[in-house]
Amino acid sequence: ASETLNSFFKTNWSFFNRESQGKIINTISKELITIGDTIGQILFQIALIFKLIVFLTIPILLNPKITIISFIFISFLAIPFLFLTKKNYQLGKIKILTANLTNGKIIEIIQAAKIIIGHGLQTKAIKSYITAFDNHMVPSIKSQTISSIPSGLFPPLGILSVILAIGLTLEKN
């Protein structure tokens, strides 16, 4: 985003006179949001679906009884995630607030671009945006970390289920 602002400030004066502020603001906001959210979410969801299929299919095929027992056990392990969900909800509210402040900062900068360029305040404007963005990153990273915990548990729990199923199958034979 700071590179975008640098390019923005190097634009000719005629660009600001030719294009409406609304178009500039909407374009920049839309592009930043679209790039950041879309790619990450699509890839995350695809990976999560494949993990779920693999880690559920193998134990069910090897030993359905143990798989059911494992699911019951895992259900008890899921209780702490209820508390994490509440924390993530609070972080989500903070993320919305900081995202609004970050977007507000970029809008202020775009609206005052002529003044900022005219007075040579580009560095100060960029730093103020980076500060707002950094303040947004902290709750965003915490929230994304909490959100990724369940998917991070799929591999070890799947492996545990396979080991238990193989162990009990060998015990029967």
Image (cartoon, grey):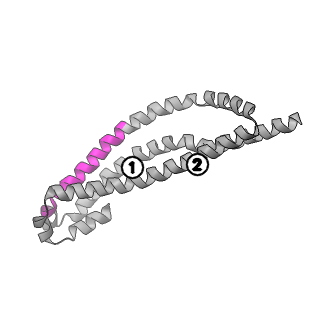
Q: Is residue 24 visible?
A: yes
Q: Is residue 114 magenta?
A: yes
Which residue is nearer to you in this view: 31 or 121? 31
What x and y, as percent, mark residue 16? Answer: 13, 65
Most distant residue in the left direction: 17
What x and y, as percent, mark residue 145? Answer: 49, 44
- Mark 2 → mark 1, Cα distance in angstroms: 29 Å
The label on residue 137 is 1
The answer to whether residue 64 is above or below residue 1 is above
Q: How crowded is the residue under tag 1: few (<14 C-alpha within 10 Å), some, or many (20+)?
A: some
Left-right relation of 80 to 31: right
What x and y, as percent, mark residue 81? Answer: 53, 32
Q: Quadrant of the N terminus?
A: bottom left
> What is the magenta range?
93-115
> Which residue does the image show at 60% across and 47% down from the upper left?
51
Amino acid tagged 1: Met
Q: Nearer the viewer, mark 2 or mark 1?
A: 2
Q: Which residue is mark 2?
A: 50
